Image: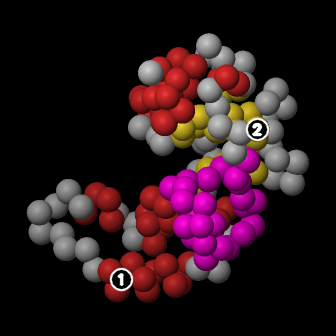
Amino acid sequence: MKVREIMTKDLTAVEKDIPVRELIFILDNAEMPNVPVVDEESMLIGFISEKDLIRAALPGYFEMLHSASFIPDMNQLASKLAQIADDPIEEYMRSDVLSVTMDDDDLRAADLIIRKGVKNVPVVDDQGRLVGRVRRIDLLRHFL
């Protein structure tokens, strides 16, 4: 089956120049853990997640979580987030974004989601414009 048959036609995306503060508002209101980054022509140019923002605010945080002696300091996270709140997300987004096309097989999308451990994969058309996404739940519903 083709990706076009299982994808969600969700075009929620952001542009690279929006501030971190606005991205947090968007992620919260859309109840999404991540979002594609597009240019003015809706071309997929990157991806940014809650995890990327935490990593930007507290470099090394995820590595320290594996230490039994590490106790997270939420005041430090709040302070660092306040420092980067007005930065454009371009500074923290990933440009090595995974994607599939509408004509890719469903197994390609499943393979990326499972092997790369991502929650969803953007779907682009032949010109690289964002047209939707394949979420883990889309795969579960499809394979059931």
Q: Does the magenta stretch include residue 51?
A: no
Q: Residue 101 falls in which quadrant of the image? A: top right
Kind of residue at disc 1: Gln
User: Could one spot residue 52 in this view of the protein?
Assistant: no
Kind of residue at disc 2: Val
Q: Residue at x 67, y 62 (%)?
A: 90
Task: Please determine whether, in this image, residue 95 is positioned above or below residue 85.
Answer: above
* Quadrant placement of the C terminus: top left
Q: Residue at x 60, y 72 (%)?
A: 25
Q: Which residue is drawn at 59% across and 67% down?
A: 29
Q: Which of marks 1 and 2 is nearer the N terminus?
A: 1
- Does 45 sit left or right of 34 as displayed? right
Circle 1 is placed at which residue position?
A: 76
Residue 93 coordinates in the image, percent (x, y): 60, 57
- Residue, far left: 68
Specify start and end residues of the magenta stretch as a single range.
11-37
Q: Residue 48 falls in which quadrant of the image? A: bottom right
Number of numbered callouts drawn: 2
Residue 125 coordinates in the image, percent (x, y): 79, 30
The local crowd at label 1, few if under 14, some if 14 to 19, many if 20 or more residues have their Cα within 10 Å, is few
Circle 2 is placed at which residue position?
A: 131
